[in-house]
Amino acid sequence: MMDPAKLRAALRKPWIGPLVALVAVYLLFVALRPDTFARPTNLVTMARQTAVVGIAASGMTMLMILGGIDLSVGSMVALTTVIVAASLKAGAGVATAVLAGVAFAALAGAANGAITTGLGVTPFIVTLGAMRILRGVAKGLAHEQKIDVDAHGLDALVAPVPDSRAWMLFPPSVYLMLASAALAGVILKYTRFGRHIVAVGSNEQTALLCGVEVGRVKVAVYTLSAALAGLAGVIEFGTLTVGDPTDSNGLELEVIASVVIGGGSLSGGEGSVPGALIGAFLMTVIKTGCTHLGWSNWVQEVVTGGIIVTAVAVDRLRRARRAG
């Protein structure tokens, strides 16, 4: 039997509340649409649809714990689809095209981190500018149109698992999402670098006085977060099978919302990778459930927006209670 003290500590985890909400919402839609929503294939589909946001949210969690934010994630994902498509069309191999897309996203993230650190410009402004710049670069590379190209097997990352590999249960994109979350979780909990991320996000000046190289930590986190956004872009290309410079508008808001719903704080110092994945899956469940009920898209947006506002309000109340 679990020790009561350990049980209370477990229940105080920031992702417990979102998990309870996820289970409740899922069961609600199961009760309303048991004939379609409760099917195992629907669960697999929702997991597959969560992969892009979930992968990007793992990186965003580290960034928000650091005290930063990245509004250019959606543009990075779109640009990655364009780079992958353009590389494949130019005759590059699959590995080269994927590495090119992820590497360019990582370089963009490093630039965001360097400008934020070196010039002291707030992350909101830097990444807001980067959002427009990267979107413009994507449109320029694609000549303001979609790039049609053979997916060279990258569509298998998100395609339903064939009967011959039914043991996999989920497509590779879902496992890439879980691997990204595991990587971010291990970094935050078990490495010196992760402790420095939390220290900088909690109190940057104190971290600096303790010998933490704040500038390097910031650049490294922005780079890693952007690389994961690039990986999400590869998954998005597998879904679209085209390079689309107009894709993923507003994706950054979904990613940030996932982190906040999962217990992350916009003030830095707090966050949970499992919570971010739960937040991402919660939004997918809501969208899918509304679709199964035949609700209009605007209803889905209202419900999702309400959840985001509620999550931020809960975060504020939690911080105020601790301060008091």
Image (spheres, grey):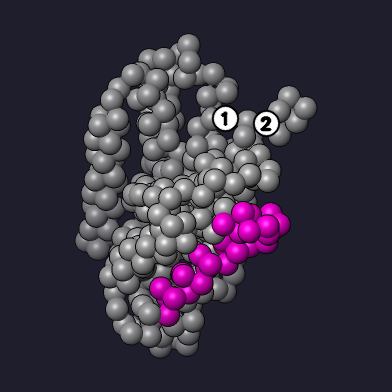
Q: Residue at x 62, y 54 (%)?
A: 89
Q: Which residue lies furthest to the top in this view?
A: 35
Front in this rendered view, residue 284 or 31: 284
Residue 224 within the segment the image draws in magenta: no
Question: Dot 1 lies on which element?
Answer: helix
**Residue 266 visible to the viewer:** yes
Q: Residue at x 39, y 38 (%)?
A: 283
**Front tag of 1 and 2:** 2
Residue 131 position, x and y percent, is: 35, 62
Which quadrant holds the C terminus?
bottom left
- Residue 165 located left or right of residue 297: right
Please report whichever mark, 1 or 2, sits nearer to the chain's N-terminal start.
1
Residue 318 position, x and y percent, is: 28, 53
Q: What stretch is highlighted in magenta?
A: 86-114
Instruction: Give the distance between the C-alpha atoms of the residues marked 1 and 2, in whole angstroms.
Output: 10 Å
Residue 188 position, x and y percent, is: 53, 64
Residue type highlighted by circle 1 = Val
Q: Which residue is drawn at 50% across and 32% down?
A: 46
Which secondary structure class fits the magenta region best? helix
Residue under pointer 2: 161
Residue 100 within the segment the image draws in magenta: yes
Numbered badge on residue 174 = none
**Are circles 1 and 2 on residues that touch, CB within 8 Å?**
yes
Numbered badge on residue 44 = 1
Front in this rendered view, residue 66 or 302: 302
Which quadrant holds the N terminus?
top right
Front in this rendered view, residue 166 or 29: 166
**Residue 20 visible to the viewer:** no
What crowding class fits label 1: few (fewer than 14 Cα within 10 Å), some (14-19), or many (20 or more)? some
Residue 263 position, x and y percent, is: 38, 51
